[in-house]
Image (spheres, helix red, strand yellow):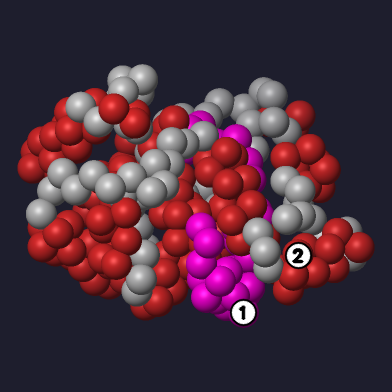
Amino acid sequence: MILLDICMEFVDDECKKQKQISTIKNIEPDDCINLYDCQLCPLPEEFVKFINQLFHHQIREYFNKSNFDSNSEDLIVFSKISSFLLKIIAFKSYENILKKNDDYFKNLLDILSCFHSMSNDPKSIFFTQDLRSTNNNNKCFAENESVFGFKRNIIGLIANYLHENMQAQEQLRISGRFIALLDSAKIDRNNPFILQWTIFAIRNALKNNPANQQFIENLQKQGEIFDDKIFNDKIKFI
């Protein structure tokens, strides 16, 4: 945990030195900042590769469990690592490590599917409710430190995988996980800016992909789009 904090501070400090992003004071997943085409390589590739492999191998085993403990230190560690990976995934120098592995992308989609299946269960620590809903005005929403920002980070990683990646775009649709992504377009107290990250992911999934665009159009015709306003106001078919 301490090592990851140090690494993230180091990445921030190095980024501040770069002229192309000199106006950015701090790079945080909350800001939905993506530095595509950035050539910066502030950390050794082997270290990044190790952290990425550790995350995917361990989290796969964790999500195979039948129950989840809200006080689990594992969840806090996973959330911290996902935040670290989201911070550096946009760097061009790490592209082959973080964005070129189909198994890792499938892993992220499986995690998203788990979130989706548990998000409507009030007893689940991954339970989420859209704070925009009028039905929630009189309810109290408690922030959960162990999962705070976790789902947002996963969707942020998925969004980066989908960026100009036709294979990932196709995998999202064929795997049946597109619905889970669409259902994540909510305002969730435990996941600040998750709506923005989800919109960005959907945009990347639709760009230059007629099959995915047709998939969304079919859902719209069937009345199965969870928030049709997103496609009218936020996302245009490209």
* One can see residue 69 in this view: no
* One can see residue 159 in this view: yes
- Place of residue 225 in the rendered image (x, y in percent of width and height, measured from the top left): 79, 56
Depth order, front residue of 146/1: 1
Depth order, front residue of 133/197: 197
> Which residue was labeled with disc 2?
213
- Place of residue 45 in the rendered image (x, y in percent of width and height, measured from the top left): 14, 59
Residue 116, placed above or below residue 210:
above
Q: Are marks 2 and 1 in contact (CB under 8 Å)?
A: no
Residue 133, placed above or below residue 87:
above
User: What's the residue at 64%, 31% (across, down)?
Assistant: 131
Q: Is residue 83 left or right of residue 181?
A: left
Disc 2 crowd rating (10 Å Cα; few below 14, some 14-19, many 20+) is some
> Which residue was labeled with disc 1?
174
- Place of residue 200 in the rendered image (x, y in percent of width and height, measured from the top left): 58, 47
Residue range corresponding to the magenta coloring:
163-192
